[in-house]
Each structure stands twice: as structure tokens, then as C-alpha cells.
Amino acid sequence: MVATGHRLKTKYPKKHNHYGFRDFFQFDPQVGTITDWMDNRNVLASEDFIIGLVAGLEEEVGDASAAIMYTIGCEWGLKDAACFSQWFEAEFDRSIRQTNLMFLLETWWWPFTSQGWGRWEVDMGDRKQGFMFINLFDSAVARTLGDVGKPVCYIYAGLFAGFFTELVRKRLSCIEIQCYSMGETYCKFLLGGQERIDAAAFWLNEGATAGDIERRLQAGDQP
Amino acid sequence: MLSRLRHLQVETEGRYATDEELKFILDYVHSFRLRRDTYIRLQAAESDIVKEVQERLQAKHPELLRSGTNDLTTKWQRDTQRVLKLTALALLLDDATTLREVFLYWFQTIMKAFKAQTSCDVTYLTMQEVIKKRFTITEASLICPLLELNRTLLGCP
């Protein structure tokens, strides 16, 4: 099969607002492929696929499925950071390290939004204390699984951990401290060093809410 | 218009469209001459409109065109011209939905990233005043709702 480049991108390589459905994806019915703006091959996955993936993994490995999904996300984030760095530089003619951080992060997430992974909001208010929060709206995993009473977006937590680890070149971890699948209106992730993530996991296990965890971290509490 | 045609295609699957469902096409046809003429006038006046908005901003809100010691004028001009071109296209095609989906939702996050919401709020409010001064009431009634859409989405905190 011969891979063909994204035609609109080939014509307008510097078009930045290319995240609309018809611009971002190129459907090629002749060869049966969907290519995105970054020339990556995409496949459409149904909610049944997500349910099958999560339920199948749980059946195979039990509680370890959460760690596996997190690890998959982490590897994905690490690789995606390298890929992102290349296309960002090609599109904006500058390195990812010479640009406004919030602009960089929005630019990283937009392809995910186009692909249906949900919208996000980054809260960098506590960055100087060594942690930050990410709010995720319309998580593909949580929206599919519905209210199951526990966090389910491990692949996202891994994705954020992997990407930000590569971005800041320092090992970071991530935990989902509030999830649409717990009956909340959106998902909330905490990103930071392992110690803080372990503390948040402990408090979460003790029944703390995302708000409690946020306050304790800001106050410098430890379990 | 294009969004509504796509919607019509979906809604009328397996049946004929009703007169009521086709009314928007007739409305568009009737409004096309005005849309085309306004589009051409906007194209011709683009640089003058941007210049006048810039002068008003410079007079009343000079801080919006600076960030510390950085002069943001060139960047502001580039952004404003881009928004105006896409606004003119949305006017020509009567398609605010596409303007939102292919541009404004993305640009909103970029403006937030650069903390430029106040600048957008003032820019597209001022631009409506400039348009009302330079265009007829009928022409302005086509352009200003789109500029208000820009202001609402790009200027929201």
C-alpha cells in the first residue's frame, strides 16, 4: 500500500487552524485509509472497542490492568513528545523550547481533541510548588464506561506522565484524582513527582476528594 | 450555509425535503448579492479597518498592544487580519457554524494561552463601531453579529 501525504497540508503546510474534522482528517476511499494532518494513519474505534479493551484486559490480568493501561499511556506519551517536537518545529519554524509554554501545550493537545480524546484545561497555578492539574472534559474512556464509581482514565494519566516527563526531562508521574466515571462532571489529573503522586494516591484511597487533595498539597501536607 | 446544507442532507435521508426545510436556501439566494458586495467591500477596506481599530486601541488602551517591553502591534495586526478574512468568508457563505468549528474554538485556546482575551474583547467591540461607521446599516447588520461572535468566543476570560 502506498502512503499518500495529507493533500491539504501539502498545499498549505503553514495553515495552523487545521483541527476541524474535514481539515484534520483525510479519508482515502480508494485505499481505505484515514490519515491525519501529521500524516499518521488513524483508525476509528467504537465505544464497544474501548469496553472490550478495558474489560478484556481486566479479565486477563485483574487489578494489574490499571498499571498496564498507565504504562501503555506513558510509552505513548514519551514517543508522542518526540513526534510532536518534530511537527511543531516544521510548522512553526522554532524549537519547542523557544516558545510560550501554554501555547505549546495547547498545540500538543489539539490533535487529541480532533481525534475525540476530549478537551482539556491545564492549571499551572501550582507549577512552582512542583505539581500541576489537568482537567479533562469528555474523556473517551470515562464517557464510554459511564458511572462505575472509580477512576478509569489510566491511559490518559500515563499519556500526561510520559509527555511531560519528556518535555521537562525529569521523571514525572500522574494520577487521576477525579473522574467522570465517579459521577463527577469532568476528570481531573494531578501531575508531579512520584512522592506527591503517592501522597495523593494514599489520600484518594482514604476517601479524599480532588478538592481535599489540592488543599493538602498546597498546604505542603504529607500522609 | 454549507453547514446547514450538510445538516439538510442528513435530516432528509430517505425522504424529500419540505418547503420549510428549503427556505434557508432561498433566503441565502436572495441575500447573496448583498453578501457578495459586502465581502468585496470588506476585502477592499481590510487594511483601513484594521488601521482604524489599531489607532483607537492605541489611543484608549495602549497597554493592549504591549507586553512589558515587547511591542505586540505586528502580531496583533496579523491576528486581526486573519480573523477579519475568515469573518468575511463566513459572511459570504452565511456560515457562522463553520467559522466556529474550523477556527474560533482553536483560536480561543491560543488567545487564552497568550492571555489575549481582553485585547480580543476590545478589538472586536471596537471593530463593530468602525464597521458601523464605514458600512451601510444593512451591510453592518451582516458583519457585526459575526464580529460579536468573535468577541464572545475570543474575549471570554
Image: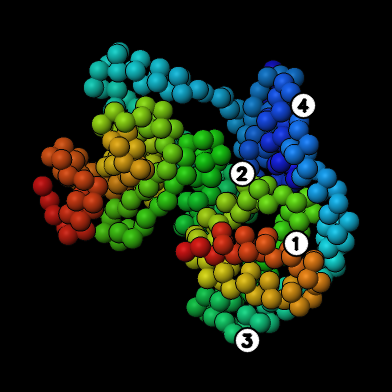
Upstream in sequence: badge 1 or badge 3: 3
Q: Quadrant of residue B77?
A: bottom right
Discs 1, 3 touching: Cβ within 8 Å: no
The reply, left or right, for residue A201 in relation to residue A19 is: left
Q: In this rendering, which labeled residue sits more in front, label 1 or label 3? A: 1
The image shows residue A81 at horizontal and vertical percentages of 47, 41
Residue B3's place in the image compared with A219, above or below, is: above
Chain for mark 2? A
The reply, left or right, for residue A189 in relation to residue B119 is: left
* Secondary structure at numbered mark 2: loop
Gap in angstroms between the C-alphas marked 4 and 1: 31 Å
Chain for mark 3? B
* Crowd around label 1: few <14 · some 14–19 · many ≥20 (10 Å): some
To the question of a shared chain for discs 3 and 2, the answer is: no
Q: In this rendering, which labeled residue sits more in front, label 2 or label 4? A: 4
* Secondary structure at numbered mark 3: helix
Farthest residue toward the bottom?
Answer: B59
Residue to which mark 3 is pinned = B59
Residue to which mark 1 is pinned = B142
* Crowd around label 4: few <14 · some 14–19 · many ≥20 (10 Å): few
Three-letter code for the amino acid on which mark 3 is drawn: Ala
